Amino acid sequence: MEDLIHKTFSSTEIIDRLGLEKERFRGWVDKGYITPSIKKAEGQGSRHEFNLMDLYSAALFLHLIEDVKTTRNEAASLVKIWRNTIERDAKVVDVAYFHYIIFIRHHGEIVSVSFFPKDAFRVKETKDMISVVVGFVRSTAIESDWEDAIMINFGQLVKNIRRRIK
């Protein structure tokens, strides 16, 4: 498989990888929910150019609005927080380490973003319930009265994208 870290993706490639309609993705870009990091189209005949993090951002955005049921604005905010945290804390995007993402909310605001490796949790499924056991914790300190959390299996999103890249 080619070196994806340095690959440039067109809008069409992202649309294909994520199974989106062209107009839907174009709307996300036009509204600033997804921003091309390599090159923004400038007029007729030019095209947006995206990097791998942009592709992952679009996948995370899609997951948040379709599966987690956040609004587009909240999803865009969460993606921005996620990207800023990774870009601030990591020199290389190591998706093996950033397998799970957990956003913690307090009074409606994200107060913490934590990343966990693949082996951080054990998932136990029974007929009636799925339970998650935390086996590893690396997190910023938060107040004990937080309201809720959003947990994303980012590793699965990445795995699904990589399956679609030939």
Image (tube, rainbow, N blue to C red):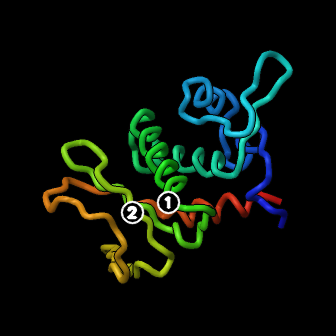
- Image side of residue 26 versus residue 42, left or right: left
Task: Say which residue appears at 46% left-offset and 42% top-offset.
Answer: 65
Say which mark, if any, is on residue 125: none
- Which residue type does callout 2 highlight? Ser
The C terminus sits in image quarter? bottom right
Residue found farthest to the left = 145
Residue 48 in the image, given as x and y percentages of width and height: 75, 32
Q: Which residue is mark 2?
A: 114
Task: Say which residue appears at 31% left-offset and 64% top-offset.
Answer: 140
Residue 87 in the image, given as x and y percentages of width and height: 54, 53
Question: Quadrant of residue 121 in the image?
Answer: bottom left
- Image side of residue 137 versus residue 54, left or right: left
Count of numbered badges drawn on the protein? 2
Q: Which residue is mark 1?
A: 89
Residue 110 in the image, given as x and y percentages of width and height: 31, 47
Q: Which is closer to the viewer, label 1 or label 2?
A: 1
Element type at mark 2: strand
